[in-house]
Image (spheres, rainbow, N blue to C red):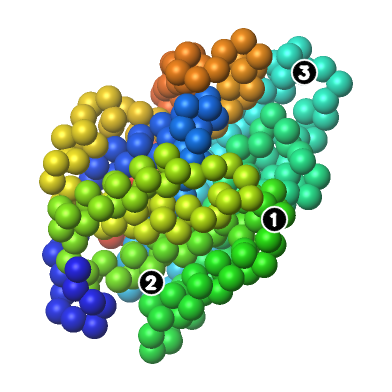
Amino acid sequence: MAAPGEAAGKPILNGYIPALDGLRAFAVLLVVAFHARVLPGGFVGVDVFFVLSAFLITRVLKQELDATGGIRLLRFSGRRLARLGPALVLMLATYLAVAPLLWPRQPHVGDALLAAFYVSDYSFAAFGRPLYLQHSWSLAVEEQFYLAWPLMLPLLLRSRRPLHVLAVAYVALIWWRAGFGDDWRTYYYRADTRCTGLVIGAGLALAIDRLDFSRAHALTGALLVMLAAVLGRFGPDAALVFPVAEVGAALLVGAAAQGQLGALQPALCASSALLIGKLSYGIYLWHYPITIALRPWFDGAALFVLVLVPSVGLAWLSWVTVEQWPRRLRRPDPAPALQGSR
């Protein structure tokens, strides 16, 4: 891989890159497998999501900054809300209708509000709520990061060495996380201790034009993510595998963006992978309450299948109904960008 100060690397593919949807499928299947107790370190699927999300969104923001000299913050936030909000509202409305029947005497309305206002990362770390919407912590981490990142990016790009600044920030965040010691329930969920994957993805977006990914990088990335997923353990040692998964995800995303996946290309671009990847946001939203509802009776591979099938179905219904109308109403971008940003 060429160093950032060297000649330009391979060009990035334009338009829709199917393999990135394949990576989304890979990530969400890891998370579902983790919650079904099939894969002990499958929680690193969230880190794959973080890297991919920040890579795509930073590319879009930088394109706007280069084209117009600024970033329209209200437009950026409004588009994210229009893209992600309807599916979340539908899931929360369904949850509020069903959850009181399954788990009575619980503060479901308050929990839904924590998820809806993207504060469940800090609320769960501090108070253990929302219990049955616990998975919404990762959505909160992303939204809090993207409130600050459009403001920080123009300032970062004015510095002489923006990638060095991000590298220092990444190391500082790992040091900050390590300071929590065995208090893993705090560092696992909070934005200030789990945003390292977003920082790596943002750095990749700024550096990729000067990097040269190969098929060997793609295979190495896949091995690193799977190593983290197999060896990782949910608990005090979880943080040990975060950087492994983040670096692996960055290698995969970079190789996919430059069309260098090699032997991984057929699997990531298979029709089933593309479908799951396209629906991955909805699958993530629906899978956790379904998992908790079925856990008293099922576990392992059976639970994985029994969660995945209805999650895909509900995500598809959400996709063809509430998620499509904002896309149809949205005005086209002034300049083409990598597609598929969440």
Alpha carbon separation for disc pair 2 and 1 = 41 Å
Q: Which residue is mark 1?
A: 182
In the figure, residue 276 lies in which quadrant?
A: top left
Alpha carbon separation for disc pair 3 and 2 = 48 Å
- Is residue 60 in view? no
In depth, the one of 147 and 33 nearer the eye is 33
Q: Is residue 68 above or below residue 294?
A: below
Q: Which residue is mark 3?
A: 103
- Is residue 320 in view? yes
Is residue 126 shown left or right of residue 261?
right
Q: Residues within 10 Å of mark 3 (few under 14, many from 20)?
A: few
Alpha carbon separation for disc pair 1 and 3 = 31 Å
Amino acid type at circle 3 is Trp
Q: Which residue is mark 2?
A: 65
Is residue 328 shown left or right of residue 16?
right
- The residue depicted at 47 percent of the width and 13 percent of the height is 302
Spot occupied by residue 145 in the image (x, y as percentages of width and height): 56, 60
Q: Residue furthest right?
A: 105
Spot occupied by residue 152 in the image (x, y as percentages of width and height): 52, 73
In the figure, residue 66 lies in which quadrant?
A: bottom left
In the rendered image, which quarter contains the N terminus?
bottom left
Judged from the image, the secondary structure of the residue bearing numbered disc 2 is helix
In the figure, residue 193 lies in which quadrant?
A: bottom right
Judged from the image, the secondary structure of the residue bearing numbered disc 3 is loop
Q: Is residue 213 above or below residue 151?
A: above
Count of labels shown?
Answer: 3
In depth, the one of 111 and 126 nearer the eye is 126
Amino acid type at circle 1 is Asp
- The residue depicted at 72 percent of the width and 54 percent of the height is 183
Is residue 330 shown left or right of residue 233?
left
Which of disc 1 and disc 2 is earlier in sequence? 2
